[in-house]
Amino acid sequence: MIGNSRPNDSLPEVENITLEPKCGEDDYYDTPEPKKDPSNEQESSRSHSNPFLPSTTFRQDSRSSFMSLLSRNKGGSLDDPRPNSPALMREDTHSLPDTTFHSIEDIQEYSKYHLLIHLRQGQDLPAKDSCGTSDPYIKFLLASKMVYKSKTIYKDLNPFWDENFYITIEDLNLPLELKVYDYDWGLRDDFIGQAFISLKTLILNQPQDIVVTLHETGNIKYLGQISLNVKLIPLLPDTPLPPLPLHPPSSTSHHSSFSHSPARGLELAARRLKPGTWSAIVNILLVEGKDLLAMDIEGTSDPYCKFRLGSDRFKTKTIYASLNPKWNEEFDLYLYDESELEITVWDKDQRSKDDFMGRGCIDLSTLSREDSHHLWIQLEEGSGQIFIILTISGTTGRDNPTFLSNWDNTNSINLYREKYALKQSLTNIDDVGVLIVKVFGARGLHAADLGGSSDPYCVLELDNTRVLTHTEYKTLEPSWQKVFVLSVQDVHSVLNITVFDEDKNHKSEFLGRLVVPLIKIKNQNKRWFALKDKKLRCRAKGQCPQIQMEFILHWNIIRATYTTLNPKKTLYKETVEKFKRQVFINNVMRIKAVILEIVDFGVFIQSCLEWESTSRSIIAFITFMTISYYFEPYMVPVGLLLIFLKQYIFKVYLDPKHLEREEQYLSEDDDEMDEKDEDKEEKKSLKEKLQAIQDVTAMVQNALGYVASLAEGVKNTFNFSVPFLSWLAVIIFSIIAVVLYFIPLRVLIMVWGVNKFGKKLVRPDTVTNNELMDFLSRVPSDEDLLDARELRLLPDTQETGKKSTVKKKHKQS
């Protein structure tokens, strides 16, 4: 349901309207233009004049009376009684009865409607800018999906839009939502107010003047008014759909991820054939090299690597002027009959042939499948080593133990339960636990191929481990039936689950993503999870895409406690964050929220000092004097324990349901529309200027994000966002309180100083760390909690998907 804005000078005929598809669909419909008789062309032009706009237009001053505008009916009536302005829908054209329906039963006889809207103006909008004005625009939403966005009127509290457009409606029970925002270029747009229009109360084929009052959610405060004229026109259910065009219009081409080219045609033809004879996928993460040969006169080299597995090859990027290069580059090779992986290292030369620096070989038949191997490869015919993380995954043979039919569930669970029991805590302190992931299947996935299907496979990533399932071809409901055993080095890690569509050119298309914190996993709970988009803020494309999984986590609490108080393990696969305006704005808003809480606390203290409330100031004065007189150091952790107690009582006893309200998310298409608008505003010259300061802005962006994460981590420690960390903090504070009660503070400070100064003398290889910062690095920030929050499963999703499939088959027939 996409709104189509109309120009102010003319409106095309109804028969020639190009209908755009729903957001997220790849179907494009446009009605072919009917042939016109030259003899009747003049008469047709008179009978199809613009029903929205009058013959004379004028600009209504924003300071004029708001109600007088309604009485003037400035182009607002959708049935203009002037000559040469007949009704928009004629009976001889669309065969619509000229009858007014008042009952819902009669209205529901139609499957689709056109809602014609003339957006007039706003009145008494609040000022959001420092100059005392606003730059308002309106978003029209149906079922939380944006269907139209108005233009922005700058510096006006009584904006005049005068815009005409229409939207396609399928369900009259859903209200039309209007959200008004104030445009801000540098920061996030300010919310002004919202209003709802009930569609089932509208009278068919009759224009209606509507004035809606803006409010905030849960607040009845007056925030201005919006004036518009609407007309609801039904479409007969037996009206045939227009034919599907071979090439979609360019304005909506962003819905497709393919281009119509001969190469693409050959690829699609190949995908219809039986998959290749490869038996597994070899995922390689080239991390670094060490002590390589110096091939240049300056005593350095410009190394790069070549990998060959059978006929499949890959060349890495070049690291200039380094004998210890760090690539951190990941790629996949397909395993056929050949099982020997050959690696060669070369020195890049600009004016001569590249110099050979060494080679290494790995026999893949000796490595276990579905497991990540950390390998240091000694180079032959040269010097030095290279470090890679290699995983053989995506096996297709049904005799492989990773298939659920070959998995011994009972014996495996008993073995891991015994391995990570408390009595085994000191055997291997770095091995925290094991995660068993069962991937059953998915449903409702987005159709990424031309034939209306996809070739989905699932990728699981945990720290430096990456495994994947085999590919299920030509289906939107794959059934993988796989099981993976992943080693857990840190119980606070996050499992990333991503579903892709396989392409023969080694490029995959994104279908959905899910983030699962290990600390929140409930064992042996087979269930469906809703897939999210790339930004982890809204649902992925498709018919409410879901994935069915089961997790079994066994971990040792003593080892997990030791790991929590030590530095995190190095993640070799880390992407370098570039400057992004939206990320920068989001981090600024997070810092702003933390600062506002501090300011509110300062305002409270100031109110106590200024005796704004006599009773509150007396209580604050007595409390301050008592604490100052009787204060002892052990009271600090005791006070923190009281905060834990308060939050725990509130969470367990006062709020037993623990229900998280799901926000209304915008779709991916809305984000793409906003990004395109921003791209139009930025010119090439401006981008070139920003390139010079990109490193500085990226550093500021990441610093703001780090500070915000620390502040949110402190807050989430006290509110039991992660119960394990909160209880661990309770135990630590209790121990500190007891120690401070019996031992003087100055003695503890001296012992702490001796420990910090003597640590390097006793253990030279130890890593200097801050236990408090290491602890806070394990506490998730608000962004991490939002990423891991599950979306509600829609009821009867599978039945709805089946019905939609039946409808598509009926249309194709």
Image (cartoon, rainbow, N blue to C red):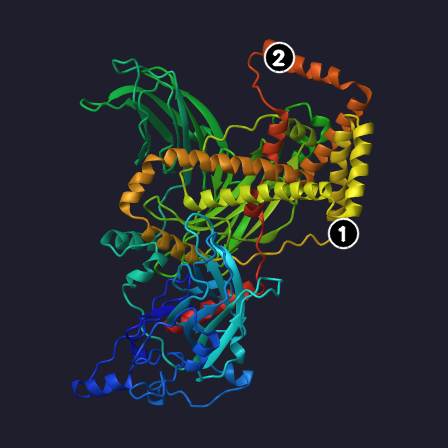
Residue 688's disc number: none
How many numbered circles are shown? 2
What amino acid is at disc 1? Leu
Would you say residue 406 is visible in this rendering?
A: no
As drawn, which residue projects farthest toward the top?
Answer: 761
Asked whether 602 or 578 is in front, the reply is: 602
Asked whether 803 or 643 is in front, the reply is: 643
- Residue with the mark numbered 2: 757
Residue appearing at x 48%, y 70% in the figure:
226
Asked whether 626 or 406 is in front, the reply is: 626
- Under tag 1, what secondary structure? helix
What amino acid is at disc 2? Phe
Asked whether 552 or 118 is in front, the reply is: 118
Query: Is residue 68 positioned above or below 430 on the image?
Result: below
Write down the quadrant of residue 395 in the picture. top left
Query: Is residue 22 positioned above or below 352 on the image?
Result: below
- Could you tell me which quadrant the C terminus lies in? bottom left
Left or right position of 449 against 419: left
Image x and y of residue 750, in percent: 70, 14
Image x and y of residue 371, in percent: 50, 34
Write down the quadrant of residue 162 in the picture. bottom left
- Residue with the mark numbered 1: 654
Query: Is residue 531 positioned above or below 65 on the image?
Result: above
How many residues crowd mark 1 within 10 Å: few (<14), some (14–19), many (20+)? Answer: few
Image x and y of residue 255, in percent: 36, 58
Task: Compute the Cα span from label 2 to label 1.
Answer: 47 Å
Residue appearing at x 42%, y 90% in the figure:
98
How many residues crowd mark 2 within 10 Å: few (<14), some (14–19), many (20+)? Answer: few
- Under tag 2, what secondary structure? helix
Would you say residue 151 is visible in this rendering?
A: yes
